[in-house]
Amino acid sequence: MNKIAFIVILLLILPIVVAQNETNETQEELTFVRFRILGIIPDSINIGDAQINIQVQNTGNIEAKDIFAIITGEGISTYEIIPIDELQSFSKSYIIAKINAKKSGVIALKVKVSDQTQQFNLTVTDPNAGKEVESEEEKQAKLESQKSELREIIAQHYANYEKYAEQYEQRKRLGFIVDNVDISTAKQQLISAQSALARDDIRGADAAIAVVETELDDIKKELEQTYVPKKTWSDLAKENIVIIAAIFTALVGFITLYEILKNKVKGEK
């Protein structure tokens, strides 16, 4: 095989070698877990039992599991924490904290997740301050009114969710990068809101709806930021390895035939 054949082979296998080196370099990166506490939802509750949703992002480069939170604040006690079971790198989710607030006012709420601590202002209101005691009939009428209002809000959010879910699937089919778009949390919280409403748990429904609204806003922004990736030489090489192999075989065959014919002509002379 002459120099031309060697150069042709080198040009054909170079993109594959480069792609393999990129993969090896990625695998050699150090792995770590790190968290960022993004906020609490809602940031305003009534005195008594309430649910706080703590939004957490995994800013590390590996999956994290069993993510808990510790909550402290004046007059605040925690009676249940529902952790995040699994959280992929750069994904976001919610730790659910069921708390009891004993005093009204703006409470400095400290939230600790792993080695990260963040302080948030939580407004606690006493809805009964200065009011006369309601009769059972008045309480039931108020409850039904609240449930009716929340059902309408949930229905509207479901419609928006379905619209975004359709856009997500459409962009995914067209080859857009949608890995950073999380549509599952919004649906889960919509289901939680409906379940809370069925139990007459207005506070639980309100908390879930607050999360849904935040998630729908995030989905809208994330969908707007999706894009079709540009392919590198190494990507093209991987996708067209069969074609490259066929071209390589044909070129080698052509060069070999050329050498045979050239030697034959020389022999005849």
Image: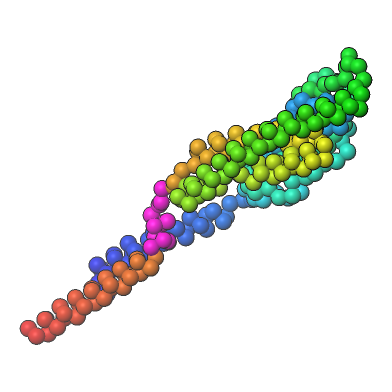
Q: Is residue 6 above or below residue 82?
A: below
Residue at horizontal 87%, vertical 36%? Answer: 78
Quarter where residue 150 is shown: top right
Residue at the extreme bottom: 268
Determine the residue positioned at 82% across, 30% down: 143
Please tell me whether residue 6 belongs to the stretch shown in magenta.
Answer: no
Q: Position of residue 62 (x, y in %)?
A: 65, 50
| 68 sits to left or right of 253 | right
Q: Nearer the viewer, residue 95 or 202?
A: 202
Evaluate whether residue 215 shows in this view: no
User: In the rendered image, which quarter contains the N terminus?
Assistant: bottom left
- The answer to whether residue 9 is seen in the rendering is yes
Residue at the (50%, 37%) spot, across then down:
224
Give residue 129's quadrant in the image.
top right
Q: What's the magenta bit mostly, secondary-structure-wise?
A: helix
Residue at 77%, 28% (x, y): give it. Answer: 145
Q: Residue furthest top?
A: 130
Residue 44 in the image: x percent, y percent?
Answer: 77, 25
User: Where residue 52 sits: x, y (%)?
Assistant: 78, 34
Instruction: Give the residues in magenta.
Output: 230-240
